Image (cartoon, rainbow, N blue to C red):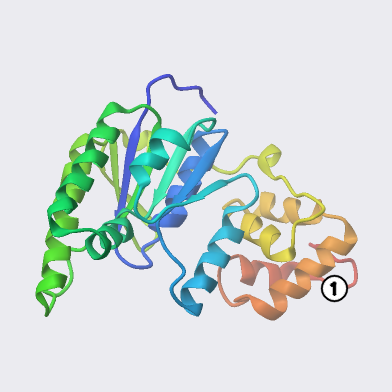
């Protein structure tokens, strides 16, 4: 990874299930050696708890974590030292938290404090946010207020950002910045780090992100026999084996040798 002395602000926008969070994670991992995930979501029900659990697994053990639904400015200023980049996911959930939990008079001050902190560029920051202006007009006044606040905040951060990416169906569209620096890099062999304590779910979250089929196969086959067979059982019984890496796995896996061939 090339060392960069100039701090950058990257804004990643997209709709639901557009791939914005996955792309932002990959961008951080490919451009920096250490990174922290600043999560703004709260566990409010079982579904959210399960989503957060899976998200933690997909990030892997190299990611540091801070969970802060409201005071992200304070977190950026006092708790994020020691890493090269901070990923905030997601800005829109943070705004929703602010809208529900603080007085109306304070909402703009919260936004202004965040914008001031981001403008200082004291650290590399990647922000994930929802694009809320392409759907239907919300039926209720609070929904319309939230849509307007989110849209304006996205505009202000996009103006500050060095790079702005809009995600559509898992594909990045560069709206601002150097497109060449946004191209997805192929994960290098030396970056495949599997530790003995990792679960099959954690190992698969790393392997399934590898684009190059040869490296994907080599990564799996580098595991010891026990880990390979545990992972095979996990993939074949709990994952989608009809598309993507699951399809390649089901086609190439030899149950006798325990290898992808």
Q: Is residue 176 above or below residue 173?
A: above
What is the quadrant of residue 53 in the picture? bottom right
| Residue appearing at x 17%, y 43% in the figure | 156
Mark 1, residue position: 255
| Residue appearing at x 13%, y 75% in the figure | 138
Which image quadrant: the N terminus? top right
- Please provide percent x and percent y for residue 105: 12, 54
Q: Residues within 10 Å of mark 1 (few under 14, many from 20)?
A: few
Depth check, front residue: 153 or 209 = 153
Which image quadrant: the C terminus? bottom right
What is the quadrant of residue 192 in the picture? top right
Q: Is residue 148 above or below residue 189?
A: below
Depth check, front residue: 73 or 245 = 73
In terms of secondary structure, where does tag 1 sit? loop
| Residue appearing at x 45%, y 40% in the figure | 86
Q: What residue occupies the far top of the structure in this picture?
A: 5
| Residue appearing at x 66%, y 40% in the figure | 191
- Please provide percent x and percent y for residue 35: 53, 39
- Please provide percent x and percent y for residue 18: 36, 63
- In screen coordinates, is 88 left or right of 92? right
- In screen coordinates, is 226 left or right of 210? right
Depth check, front residue: 68 or 224 = 68
Residue 123 appears anywhere in the view? yes
- Please provide percent x and percent y for residue 15: 29, 64
């Amino acid at each position: 990874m090339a060392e960069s002395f100039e701090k950058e602000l990257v804004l990643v926008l997209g709709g639901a299930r557009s791939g914005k969070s996955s792309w932002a994670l990959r961008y951080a991992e490919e451009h920096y050696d250490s990174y922290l995930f600043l999560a703004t979501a709260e566990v409010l029900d079982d579904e959210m708890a399960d989503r957060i659990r899976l998200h933690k697994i997909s990030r892997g053990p190299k990611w540091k974590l801070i969970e802060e639904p409201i005071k992200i400015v304070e977190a950026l200023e006092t708790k994020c030292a020691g890493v090269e980049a901070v990923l905030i996911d997601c800005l829109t959930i943070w705004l929703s938290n602010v809208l529900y939990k603080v007085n109306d008079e304070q909402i703009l001050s919260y936004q202004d404090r965040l914008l001031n902190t981001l403008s200082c560029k004291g650290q590399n920051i990647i922000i994930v946010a929802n694009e809320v202006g392409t759907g239907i007009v919300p039926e209720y006044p609070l929904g319309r207020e939230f849509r307007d606040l989110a849209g304006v905040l996205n505009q202000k951060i996009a103006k500050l950002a060095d790079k702005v990416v809009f995600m559509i169906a898992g594909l990045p569209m560069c709206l601002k910045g150097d497109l060449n620096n946004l191209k997805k890099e192929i994960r290098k062999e030396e970056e495949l780090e599997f530790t003995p304590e990792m679960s099959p779910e954690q190992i698969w979250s790393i392997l399934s992100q590898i684009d190059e089929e040869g490296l994907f196969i080599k990564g799996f086959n580098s595991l010891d026999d026990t880990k390979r067979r545990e992972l095979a059982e996990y993939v074949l019984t709990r994952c989608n084996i009809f598309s993507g890496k699951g399809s390649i796995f089901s086609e190439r896996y030899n149950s006798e040798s325990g290898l992808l061939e």
